[in-house]
Amino acid sequence: MPKRLNFAAETFAYMTQGIILPSFYLGPIAAFSAINAIGNVPIYLEQYEHFPKQTYRNRASIYSPNGKLDLIVPVVKGSKVHTKMKDVRIAYEYDWQRLHWMSLQTCYRRSAYFEYYEDEFAPFYEERHDYLFDLNEALLELIMRCVKLNREIRKTSTYESSYPDCLDLRESIHPKKEAPGFAAKPYFQVFEPKHGFLPNLSIVDLLFNQGPNSRQYL
């Protein structure tokens, strides 16, 4: 049985209205652990923030034969300066979709459940989305279904600097920060014997390795 992620209960004791999340590309496990822990409240996706660089908005970390590998969705030049998240366009100047899909296959073909979910993820690397937000939202809906997290997904209607009645994770879940209240416990990873356990990778690392047990782990 996989060990569990531990979010301190007091972290969520005051939350009533929902959880505010940035738009993630194949988001990290910590985000989904928070969604699971907070209970059956709506998820609000932030679509009016200015696109921040070097975040999970357009990158995901997976476990490769050589260790951690970041998959980055390229964006159209100019999107990195004061562009609202909902308006950020994906760049297709090179075939990043093929590269990402090949990387996922290389990293997880030997995992227990990659073939089980393969047909659901493959279309995202064949069909084009014009906007990063739309791609991320569609992937989120798929992942929520795969890990059996039944939550209503909404979008913010304007930018607010704070949401006093909600759990706001827009800034706290970041590649260079430790997620608040999050403690990763080991689960089986394909290349763990070579490089050791890597915590808080993309949710697909958990999904492809643990399959139907992913929700129990969260």
Image: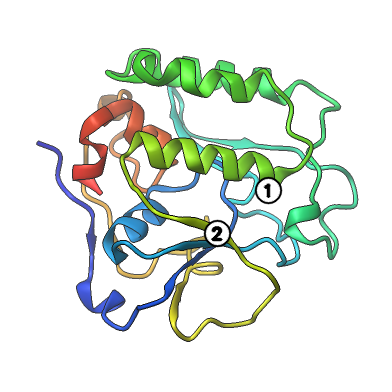
Which residue is drawn at the image coordinates 41% and 76% (left, top)? 17
Q: Of the numbered discs in the image, which one, if any, rests on residue 123?
A: none
Above or below, 175 relative to 207: below
Which residue is drawn at the image coordinates 71% and 44% (left, top)? 132
Badge 2, how many Cα within 10 Å: few under 14, some, many 20+?
some
Residue, far right: 78
Above or below, 162 relative to 186: below
What kind of element bears circle 1?
helix
Display coloring: rainbow
Badge 1, how many Cα within 10 Å: few under 14, some, many 20+?
many
Q: Give how far across and how far down residue 199 sits, in percent.
A: 34, 46
Q: Give how far across and how far down residue 48 sits, in percent.
A: 72, 66
**Any part of residue 188 in sight:** no
Instruction: Report the residue marked by disc 2.
Output: 154
Query: In the figure, residue 52 lies in which quadrant?
Result: bottom right
Mark 1 to mark 2: distance in Å?
Answer: 13 Å
Assess whether mark 2 and mark 1 are in contact (beta carbons under 8 angstroms).
Answer: no
In-front residue for pair 19/34: 19
Q: Give how far across and how far down residue 142 sits, in percent.
A: 47, 35
Q: Earlier along the polypeptide chain: callout 1 or callout 2?
A: 1
Above or below, 148 relative to 35: above
**Any part of residue 191 in sight:** yes
Q: Of the numbered discs in the image, which one, if any, rests on residue 133?
A: 1
Query: In the figure, residue 31 lies in which quadrant?
Result: bottom left
